[in-house]
Image (tube, grey):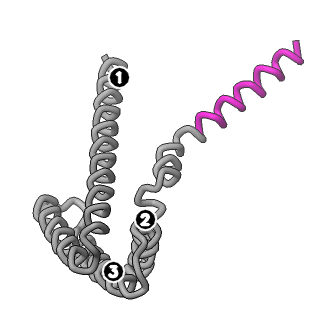
Amino acid sequence: MKKMLLLLTVTALSFTAAQAQDQLAPNARKEARGGQGKHADRTPEQRADMQTQRLTKQLGLSADQQPKVRAIFLAQATEMQSLRGQMTPGSTDRQAMGQQMKAVMTRTDEQLKTALTAEQYTKYAAQRDERMDRMEDRKAEVKAEKKTMKSKTKIKAS
């Protein structure tokens, strides 16, 4: 009898510990898949360096193009950081900020068009569009998942 009681206690404690870890999982998953948790603390210089290195690898940038591209990305990262800093929690002006960010990205693309060759820019634009499509797909998946969670919560509450 004592062994059975001990076994039940150990099982209950293990289950409780597993449940506690499960509550932390959403933040851990976000960081693991490269969400804001992983990139939020990078400086504009680090972001510009990363993007320049990525494009050098993907597009084969020349030694002359690399400093130009880095300067373009540095200006973009600095301006984006400034825009994010202006956004206060609970602010309702998210659409205006989104439009300003789109303007910054458009300006960056125009500058890249002059720094890259036509072939490089075409490849860059295709990769950018593909990244944006993947991001939209992920947003849709998250939205659907949230909707499913809400409906499950309503069912449990009833």
Question: Where does label 1 land, which residue?
Answer: 152
Circles 1 and 2: CB atoms closer than 8 Å: no
Seen from the viewer's position, the closer of residues 50 and 98 is: 50
Circles 1 and 3: CB atoms closer than 8 Å: no
Q: Is residue 71 above or below residue 113?
A: below
Residue 14, magenta (yes or no): yes
Q: Is residue 132 above or below residue 120?
A: above
Q: Position of residue 2 (x, y in %)?
A: 88, 17
Residue drawn at 16 percent across, 69 percent down: 106
Q: Quadrant of residue 7?
A: top right
User: Of the residues shown, which amino acid type is indicated by label 3?
Assistant: Val
Q: CA distance from mark 1 to mark 3?
A: 48 Å
Helix, strand or loop at mark 1: helix
Question: Where does label 3 land, which residue?
Answer: 69
Q: Is residue 43 above or below residue 64?
A: above
* Of the two numbered discs 1 and 2 in the rendering, the one whose residue sits closer to the viewer: 2
Circles 2 and 3: CB atoms closer than 8 Å: no
Q: Position of residue 63 (x, y in %)?
A: 43, 85
Numbered badge on residue 58: 2
* Of the two numbered discs 2 and 3 in the rendering, the one whose residue sits closer to the viewer: 2
Q: Earlier in the sequence, mark 2 or mark 3?
A: 2
